[in-house]
Structures are given as C-alpha cells and as structure tokens.
C-alpha cells in the first residue's frame, strides 16, 4: 500500500514511517500542508494520513480542497484535538476517518484497512481475491490455488496495485512510484524483474504487458492460475 503521510512532528512521523514500512507499506512523508495537498492532487496514493495542525494549510483545508478537486484518495485525519465539532467538520469535508492522538499503531492499521475496504468494496477482511489468487494484506502472503508464497516487499506492493485494478492498466509510473517513492532511483529494468518473479508464481498469462503504458492483471487468466 502506498501511503502519503502529512505530519509536521518529525519524531512522530519517523516512528510511523518505521512501523508502516515494517508492515510492508511504502510511505511518502511531507511536513507541509500546502505541499501535501499538491501531492494528493498530482500523485496516486492508496490512502493519506494528515495531521490536523500543519504549516501553511491545516488538515481540514487539505480535505476540503482535495475533495473539491475530485481527489478520491481516502484520507484519515490525525489530531490532538478531541472537540466533537472538529471531528464532525472533518468528516463533513470528506475525511474518511478521524483518529485522536495519542494512538496505537495497531488501531491506525485497523482503521486504514477498514477505510480501504469501504472505498474498494472488499468482501473478505484484509484479503484481495481474483480467480484462484488470494493476497493476504496483513501477512504479505500470496495463495495461488493450493500453493502459498511469502512475498518480498516489492512484489507485494506491485501485486496489491494490480489486484486493486483488475482488468485496468496500472501504468509503469504508478508502479514505480509505489516501489520507490519520489526520490528513490532504480535501475531501468527493476520493475520488469519483479513482474517476471510474479509471473513465475502466478502464471505468465495472468499479468499482461500493455506496451508503452504498463501492466494489467487479467481476471479471466486468474481463474486458471495455479
């Protein structure tokens, strides 16, 4: 899962990044509200976590302007404030959930999963399914028919995107952003290597190359995977 974290408390942010990355997520961190809003508008994320009190633009305004710009990325607001009016206003502006500081990372993870299930319409808690393919989001475990694989982080992140967009094209840029964020370089063929490894697990026909654009997971081929 690619997460945008908008938080100006560097100590808290670093703790969250470390724990989210341990849970196999890709985290892009921004400590400025205006830059965070621009990232939401210009980039693709699975979910955003935004503090309420931020430099230049607060979390409520980020939510309001993001929704006005037709940004559908799920957003969870973090705040030290406990006032009901703030929570109601945030939800009315378009936030998907609200979490009061201090919080446990386990609760944040649970809330993220719940928000993603609501927005993507999952029918099985924390599991993505296509044909005979099942991807457990909690444990980065892939099941193809009767075979089970513990996926490396990169393969897990790529397959999440493909399975959330079954029969739709995930662009090369999108997949590289999920893998490396904005500032991390990679060899030009790194993505192809990970796709090759996934095809070995799933079958060559399950992930199709759309030349010059990206990749797509074929739901018909997924029925016979494994």
Image (spheres, helix red, strand yellow):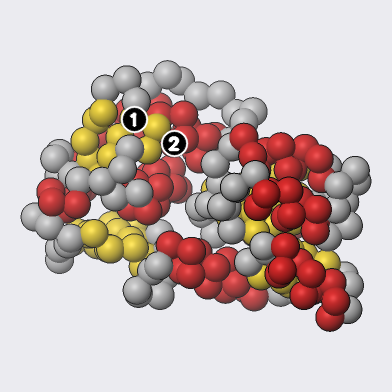
Dot 2: element? helix
Dot 1: element? strand
Q: Nearer the viewer, residue 71 or 106?
A: 71
Q: Residues within 10 Å of mark 2 (few under 14, many from 20)?
A: many
For the view shown, which residue lies furthest in the left direction?
A: 224
The residue that mark 1 highlights is 214
Residue 113: percent from the left, percent from the top? 52, 68
**Side of 141 where 86 appears, left or right:** right
Mark number for residue 175? 2
Residue at horizontal 33 percent and vertical 38 percent from the top: 169
Residue at horizontal 13 percent and vertical 51 percent from the top: 220
Residue at horizontal 28 percent and vertical 40 percent from the top: 216
Residue 1 shows in the view: yes
Occupied quadrant, residue 41: top right
**Side of 142 where 72 appears, left or right:** right
Q: Nearer the viewer, residue 56 or 23?
A: 56
Residue at horizontal 68 percent and vertical 64 percent from the top: 95
Measured along the vertical axis of the image, is residue 176 above or below residue 201?
above
For the view shown, which residue lies furthest in the front direction?
A: 68
* Mark positioned earlier in the residue sequence (1 or 2): 2
Residue 11 shows in the view: no
**Side of 108 where 136 appears, left or right:** left
Q: Residues within 10 Å of mark 1 (few under 14, many from 20)?
A: some
Measured along the vertical axis of the image, is residue 125 above or below residue 186?
below
Residue 159: percent from the left, percent from the top? 35, 48
The answer to whether marks 1 and 2 mark residues whose Cβ atoms lie closer than 8 Å is yes
**Side of 189 where 11 appears, left or right:** right
Residue 102: percent from the left, percent from the top? 82, 73
Distance of label 1 from label 2 (alpha carbons): 8 Å
Mark number for residue 33? none
Occupied quadrant, residue 48: bottom right
């Amino acid at each position: 899962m690619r997460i945008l974290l908008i938080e100006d408390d560097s100590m808290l942010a670093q703790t969250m990044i470390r724990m989210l990355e341990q849970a196999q997520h890709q985290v892009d961190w921004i400590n400025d509200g205006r830059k965070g809003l621009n990232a939401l508008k210009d980039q693709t994320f699975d979910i955003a976590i935004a503090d309420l009190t931020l430099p230049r633009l607060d979390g409520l305004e980020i939510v309001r302007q993001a929704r006005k710009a037709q940004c559908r990325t799920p957003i969870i607001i973090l705040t030290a404030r406990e006032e009901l009016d703030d929570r109601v206003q945030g939800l009315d502006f378009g936030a998907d959930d609200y979490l009061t500081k201090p919080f446990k990372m386990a609760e944040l993870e649970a809330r993220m999963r719940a928000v993603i299930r609501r927005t993507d319409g999952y029918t099985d808690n924390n599991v993505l399914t296509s044909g005979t393919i099942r991807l457990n989001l909690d444990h980065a475990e892939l099941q193809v028919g009767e075979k089970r694989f513990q996926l490396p982080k990169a393969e897990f992140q790529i397959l999440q995107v493909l399975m959330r967009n079954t029969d739709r094209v995930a662009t090369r840029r999108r997949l590289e952003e999920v893998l490396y964020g904005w500032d991390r370089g990679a060899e030009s063929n790194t993505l192809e290597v990970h796709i090759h490894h996934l095809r070995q697990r799933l079958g060559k026909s399950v992930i199709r190359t759309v030349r010059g654009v990206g990749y797509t997971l074929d739901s018909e081929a997924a029925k016979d995977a494994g």
